[in-house]
Amino acid sequence: MIPRYSRAEMARIWESENRFRIWFEIEAHACDAQAELGVIPKAAAEAVWQRGGFEVARIDAIERETRHDVIAFLTNLAEHVGHEARFVHQGMTSSDVLDTCLSVQLSQAADVLLTDLDALLAALKRRAIEHKLTLCIGRSHGIHAEPTSFGLKLAGHYAAFARNRERLQAARRDVATCAISGPVGTFATIDPRVEAHVADQLGLLVEPVSTQVIPRDRHAMFFAVLGVIASSVETLATEIRHLQRTEVREAEEYFAPGQKGSSAMPHKRNPVLSENLTGLARLVRSTVTPALENVALWHERDISHSSVERVIGPDATIALDFALVRLTGLIDQLLVYPERMRRNLEATGGLVFSQSVLLALTQAGMSREDAYTTVQRSAMATWTDGGDFQARLRDDPEVHRLLPLETLASLFDPATALRHVDIVFDRVFGPREDAAA
């Protein structure tokens, strides 16, 4: 991933230094287990820890000759350890190191993303509670539908990211497995207790059947979850982009002093952060299909998955990390305009209360079909010619016969749309938590 969209904490996980450090720990812990079992001398295992080291540049130089990254690493490690290095990698195969390392890296990346999600959830909760009763128009198909609140909008996004957090926790648990099972995964050349020891030391679970690789359905699910999280990012970003349109202008991204929106038009305040998040979400989702295609490997092992994972592992996690942090900042500083929301709510002359009138007429004895026709007649006249929807209904003899003026007027109170908002907030945030905030 390019530096523009990389945060240091996540980027370090995918740097060569971290990868080779994990390789070293896998080999050293395996030596400890082998020594405990009497397969290699304990002094050899101690030597690996005491004198073991590596240099990224040296490994890269060796790989240019050997064309094998694990052999290059082991060669460089041996240059540090000395004669005892002959006991390193006993009975193991390259996939034991590579796959177990990837499990560690994906677990590390997941931990960063979980922290990101916690920060985003906190920001969404704070703003949702702040605007719990901030009335605005709800839209379906992009068209005014019925009143809602801006807090309810944000509560819905909070709930989505809370589900995403649970999904990521499950995906992290599922991908955090260790395979030290030797060629084709039979343990013919290495004791299963070595695998158990390495897994324990690295905070992983033992892979039940590793063939010679960890099954890629685990990784496919991990990247699928990242894709779902990215879609939730785009959903919220798209909402903000629409609300910032000049014709709507109910909310907008914070515009910093000295910020410029256009090289040509000094008046512009563009939703650049939301648009950027939309693009990053597309990038993260693009890694899901290759991850799914990696599941079908030949027999006990091939490396058709390897090149894919070397790209999508860093790219997906780094891009999503950046996106979540950017989205958190956007929500924290989001500018909200309640008065504009109210004006937009009233822009159609009361048409957004058509269902309330429809239901009241049916309650008063009119058939639903006749009630719909009656209400729609006044609604379409208001839609095309403007004016006041309630006034037209007052002048309709069928409506006037069944609904007293006071009853009709009560149907146009937008606050009634929020009479159950506390129930929804209790479901999302827990009983009465919003009241204490």
Image (spheres, helix red, strand yellow):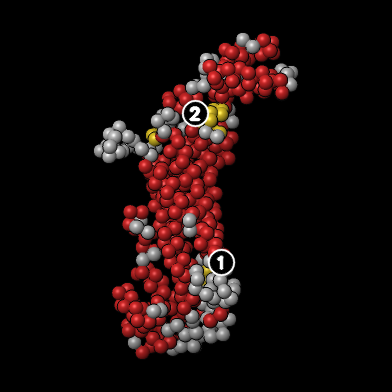
Q: Quadrant of the N terminus?
A: bottom left
Q: Which residue is mark 2?
A: 136
Residue type highlighted by circle 2: Cys
Foreground label between 1 and 2: 1
**In the image, residue 383 lies at what x, y percent?**
55, 21
Would residue 295 appear left or right of 32 to someone viewing this image?
right
Residue at which label 1 appears: 295
- Residue type, numbered disc 1: Val
The residue sitting at 34% across, 35% down in the picture is 269
For the point 51% across and 28% down, the residue is 137
Residue 194 in the image, given as x and y percentages of width and height: 51, 79
Task: Label 1: state its secondary structure.
Answer: loop
Residue neighbourhood size for the residue with mark 2, other residues' Cα within 10 Å, grouped as few (<14), some (14–19), many (≥20): many
In the foreground, 250 or 127: 250
- Of callouts 1 and 2, the N-terminal one: 2
* Discs 1, 2 touching: Cβ within 8 Å: no
Looking at the image, the residue that sits furthest to the left is 258
157 to the left or right of 257: right
- In this view, the residue in front, 312 or 415, is 312
The image shows a total of numbered marks equal to: 2
Assess disc 1: are there few (<14), some (14-19) or many (≥20) residues with their C-alpha within 10 Å of its C-alpha: some
Is residue 31 among the parts visible in the rendering? Answer: yes
Percent position of residue 263, x then y: 27, 39
